Amino acid sequence: MNPTVLGDATHASAIPTRSTVRRWRGTASLAALALVATPFAAAPASAAEADGPVFAGTLTADGTAAVGSVLTLDESGGTWTPEPESRAYAWLLSDDAALDDADVPVTDATAESLTLLPEHLGKYLIGTVTGTAAGLTGEPAAAVVGPVVEGDLVAGTASVSGTVRVGYKLTAKTAGWPAGTTFAYRWVVGGTTAGTAATYTPLATQAGRTLRLEVTGTRAGYGSRTVSSAAATVAKATFTATSLKISGTVKVGGKVSATTGNFSPAPSKVTYRWKANGRSISGATSRTYTIPSRLHGDKLTVTATASRTGYTTRTVTSASSVVAKPFARTVAPTISGTVRVGKTLTANRGTWSPAPTSVSYRWLANGKVIAGATGRTYKLTTKEHGKKISVEVKGRKHAYLTATRRSSSTAAVKWPVGISVPRVTKNPTQSTESTVGRTITLKVSATGGGLRYQWQRWTPANPKWTNMSGRTSSTLTMKGSTTLDLNRFRVVVTNMAGRDTSAYSYMWIQSSLAHPFAINQWFSLWNYNALVTNSDQYQGYLAAQVWICAAPGYYASNDLSVRFVGNNGHVYADAGSEQGDHLSWGVPLDEDGCGSFVAYSNAPQSVRDGGRWRIIDRSSGQNYIQYAKYELFNPSGASSAARTSLAAPGLAAPAGVAPLTGFRATVTD
């Protein structure tokens, strides 16, 4: 449709005609509104008949037509007839300030005020107000502003974070800018753009120049703003430096040099200056220097100075070193003393020129340092036997080079006179047989000098060699007792040169009624070792289990007789016809030659306490007799183990089975 101008706009204000407003209300279109000047207001018009309240006068939209500003409809320039009971507000966007179908309502804009947004930029804003009274809605009054221009951006601040120095990274910082602002950066050094990123690192060529940061803020719908940071002068960078050292021996005639790589980053130039006692040495400006004799005793230092464009000059100085020279005369030390274990050797350093102020010693055996041997004298130990000894002497003196001289080696270290590695020349008797109470003597002979003896004992109950307290001579003397039976004895012979161990002697002890073997103790017969467990009762008879171990090649075949001897001295018969006098008949032996059987006796109860079990070994063609204690296992009744002749009464198989070993021989007092 063709736009319709709303009245004469002589006062830059207008109201829509009755017909135009009706058309807008019905078709959501507006006729044109013509603007000729500010302030923005509808042109005055005479009141017209309406269905509801009609505004007569000037409706204005107060505010600036710029993004970010607030427009507010102002009715103070006119009146309503009749006075509205309520008002309705609307805002429309227009490309040309003409009220037509192309105008677009602003979403959610239903208040008398409107904040202008970036999307309103370049558009006209038409604000309307409609009154309602007595249920009737009148024609709207309208005001137009525009076109909307960019708003003024509120500028914040710009600053530089970091040290303004060559080689140091700087970072742009902003503060106080509205949300949604984007930034562009410009680093200006000496009046010239040096960078446009958010960070910048000054170059060495920029040292001493002025640096500042320019930040331009931009926000949609607003004009851009540029601000600058405070200016600062780019300082020179600094070197990092490590300790400077003198390489080489600081001695007369020696060539020394200053170490390199002491500065970071690498300088473009390094100069050197050598000094003696803090005073510059004429002409000594190279990295290397050959020390003349006139500097002997002086303190030598070197100074290095680094330079590079954009960097502060850095100087470092080495620690001082005294210029030394060799001793005029040194001699190898000599060794005096007897080269035998236990003897003391003495080092003689001889005459040095000049005399050292301090001397240290170090002893060696076959060229290897002896730990802790740092005195002028050294006492030889068994560790040095057979080795050749030497000594090193180290002399020190101010302004002289430390010197070390080593002696010639001695002959190999020998044992003391009369000492050699022990050797047992005569062992104790291989097997020893005795009786309870009889004196037993074992002897050993050995060579080697300075000998020490230690007798050791082995038992079936403790089958390992154990030192015997106080038995430290070449002769071992004991009284025979049942506790010695089946024991082994040997002696260890030692001196500083080494040790030797004798063969062992096997002990056999003959018991008696008065001195029987204890229960569960292994004892010797002739071709058997035996053990008797606790006694028990079985159907009125006395029972005991007997364990035996046969010598190699012997088998239990009617060799053993076991009977009970009462406390009255009477020997009681065995019980039952199935138990003949030779109770070991048919006893099975294991691979070690060991087995067990049960012996029974009809000895009455009255003679049992204090009685003994008598065991006779007839395998040698003679009666070899031993006795074992009687001890009742369960006096209140027969144990379950005693109910069968195949089970041990009271105890299971004993530990420490001891097959017969060695040969018998008789000991004489």
Image (tube, rainbow, N blue to C red):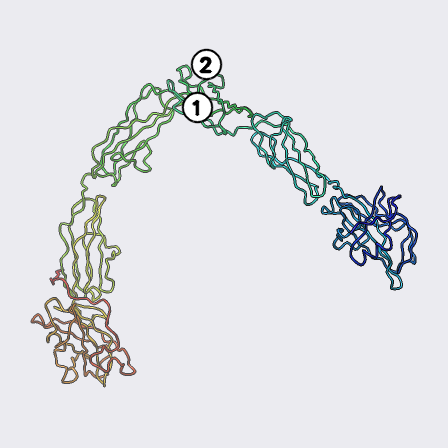
Residue 311, position as x, y percentages in the image: 55, 26
With respect to residue 636, does 194 lie above or below?
A: above
Residue 397, position as x, y percentages in the image: 38, 23
Q: Quadrant of residue 542?
A: bottom left
Q: Nearer the viewer, residue 550 or 628?
A: 550
With respect to residue 618, does 194 lie above or below?
A: above
Say what amino acid the circle numbered 2 marks.
Gly
Report the quarter where the C terminus lies: bottom left
Question: Dot 1 surroundings within 10 Å: few (below 14), some, or many (20 or more)?
Answer: many
Q: Quadrant of residue 367?
A: top left
Q: How many marks?
A: 2
Q: Secondary structure at mark 2?
A: loop
Say what amino acid the circle numbered 1 marks.
Ala
Left or right: 500 as drawn, with respect to 618: right
Q: Earlier in the sequence, mark 2 or mark 1?
A: 1
Q: Nearer the viewer, residue 69 or 209?
A: 69
Q: Nearer the viewer, residue 85 or 238?
A: 85
Left or right: 445 as drawn, with respect to 232: left
Left or right: 201 as drawn, with respect to 579: right
Question: Dot 2 surroundings within 10 Å: few (below 14), some, or many (20 or more)?
Answer: few
With respect to residue 370, does 667 lie above or below?
A: below
Q: Which residue has dot 2 on it? A: 283
Task: Find the distance from the CA under tag 2 to the CA under tag 1.
Answer: 16 Å
With respect to residue 657, does 181 lie above or below?
A: above
Residue 306, position as x, y percentages in the image: 51, 23
Q: Nearer the viewer, residue 42 or 66?
A: 42
Q: Which residue has dot 1 on it? A: 258
